[in-house]
Amino acid sequence: MNKVILIGRVTKDTELTTTTNGVNVAKNTLAVNRKFKNANGEYEADFINIIAWRNLAELLHKYTKKGDRVGIVGSIQTRSYDAPDGSKRYITEIVVDELEFLESKNVTKDSPENNAKLEPISDDDLPF
C-alpha cells in the first residue's frame, strides 16, 4: 500500500506546465510542520515536493498561492534522471490524488470568513 495524507502550506505560487501530449502538470512544495519542537522550542517543517496532473493540476494552479494551506491525499513516487554533469539524480515526490483547500494565508483570525454568525433554525424548517 502506498498512501500519503498531508496538510501543509504551499511554499510558492504553483507552476503549471503542459506535456508534449497536452496533459497539464503542476508542481509545488508543501511545508508540513513536524509534531514536536526542536531544542529551541520551535516547530520545524519538512518541505515535500508534490505533483498534480490534469484537472487537479489546474485546480492547484488556479486556486492556491504561496502560503495557502491545503490537504492532499496521494502516493509516493520516486524517479531518477541523468544530470548534465553525468551524475544520477533522484527525486521523491507525492503524486496528488485528492486535494482540499483549507485556508488562504490572507484569511486572518478577525476576517469575516472566520467570524461568520450561524443563524439558528427551528426543527420545523428541516427537510427531514
Image (tube, rainbow, N blue to C red):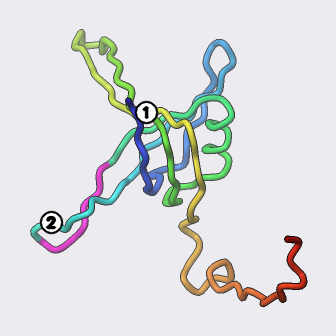
Picture residue at 72% right of the left edge, 88% below the top: 117
Is 101 drawn above or below residue 83 in the view shown?
below
Q: Quadrant of residue 7?
A: bottom left
Q: Pick whichever, 124 or 121, lies toward us.
A: 124
Picture residue at 21% right of the left edge, 71% below the top: 42
Lateral position of residue 32 relative to residue 40, left or right: right
Picture residue at 28% right of the left edge, 22% below the top: 90
Q: Quadrant of residue 116?
A: bottom right
Amino acid type at circle 1 is Ser
**Residue 43's x, y, as percent?**
25, 66
Q: Label 2 vs label 1: CA separation?
A: 28 Å
Is 74 drawn above or below residue 18 in the view shown?
below
- Tally of numbered tags: 2
Residue under circle 2?
Answer: 38
The region drawn magenta spans 40-46
**Residue 46's x, y, as percent?**
29, 51
**Residue 99's x, y, as percent?**
58, 46
Question: Which residue sits furthest front?
Answer: 128
Which badge, 2 or 1, is on the more N-terminal residue? Answer: 2
Lateral position of residue 106 relative to residue 29, left or right: right
Residue under circle 1?
Answer: 75
Number of the front mark, 2 or 1: 1
Amino acid type at circle 2 is Asn
Magenta run includes residue 110:
no
Is 71 drawn above or below residue 112 in the view shown?
above
**Residue 32's x, y, as percent?**
36, 55
Position of the N terminus, as image quadrant, is top left
Q: Are marks 2 and 1 in contact (CB under 8 Å)?
A: no
